[in-house]
Image: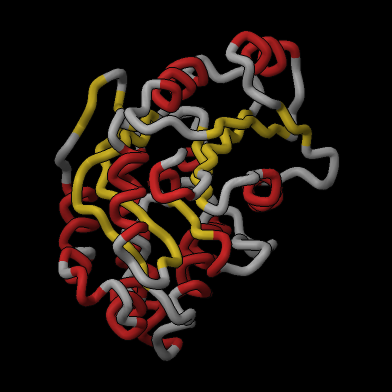
Amino acid sequence: MEEGKRLHTFVICAYKESKYLEECIQSLKQQIVKSEIIMVTSTPNLFIEETALRHKIPLFINEGEGGIVQDWNFAYKMAKGDLVTIAHQDDIYRKNYVKDMLTWIQKTETPLIYFTDYAEVREGKVVKNNRLLQVKRWMLRPLKLKSLHKSRWVRRRILSFGSPICCPSVTYVKENLPEEIFQLGFRSDEDWQAWERLSKLKGSFVYSPHILMYHRIHEESETSAVIGDIGRHTEDYVMFCKFWPKPIAKVLTKIYSTSESSNDL
């Protein structure tokens, strides 16, 4: 944490009784550069409480309205650090995630968010390459150039075709961002909505093209839960309308929906 004299906080969002929570915690504790680790939940239970106690991780209970957006905003608020990573309980962070993040942040004048390339974990196996990952990497290719990190035009053009940014790979730089990141009313595109809003701000979207975290895809995950939900298509359309006229947004929504099958197991 002393590196760059910035405090970084990992906030684990715990939900019910995830069998993957322990692996997530271990990946955070094994970082080369140590960070503060806290845990939040809106579904308190003995499993979560005992896990937090065993690892000596402070646990905060969201006693207000629950929901993915509310939980993420609560997690963001509870973090003491100026740099905040909202860690999903099923995911795994490689040991040099924090070190790489601090290196990038230190050499950026006004960083808004930092995010990385990622791999997936499917049925216990790490998948570093598939069609969805290839498309997202292609979309993010312009941001491999550090000189384009601060371009609002470039990042908005990228986001106009979908959201290639992996939410759990993101670190937020609080001093340059609003008090709440995510907007109520979204269930599947809450991250895309956030990036669209933040893309209008002056500052940099800092992209590290290294695979520094593993995002788990499984039938109990929130990502999988919204697949096939008609609300997701509605949200996709709302998002595309932020960038395109309605007729084009309708076409893009139909095309974009085909990518959802990539989360099927």
Quadrant hosting residue 93: top left
At which x and y percent is residue 100? 28, 45
At which x and y percent is residue 105? 36, 57
Which residue corresponds to the image point at 16% horizontal and 52% vertical from the top-left?
134
Which residue corresponds to the image point at 27% horizontal and 43% vertical from the top-left?
118
Which residue corresponds to the image point at 43% horizontal and 61% vertical from the top-left?
113
Relative to 25, does residue 248 appear above or below in the rendering? below
Quadrant hosting residue 187: bottom right
Total marks drawn?
A: 0
Q: Quadrant of the C terminus?
A: top left
Q: How is the image coloured?
A: secondary structure
Left or right of 92 on screen, residue 67: right
Camera-nearest residue between 107 and 236? 107
At which x and y percent is residue 8? 50, 43
Which residue corresponds to the image point at 57% horizontal and 37% vertical from the top-left?
11
- Furthest-bottom residue in this view: 245
Quadrant hosting residue 111: bottom left
At which x and y percent is residue 219? 45, 29
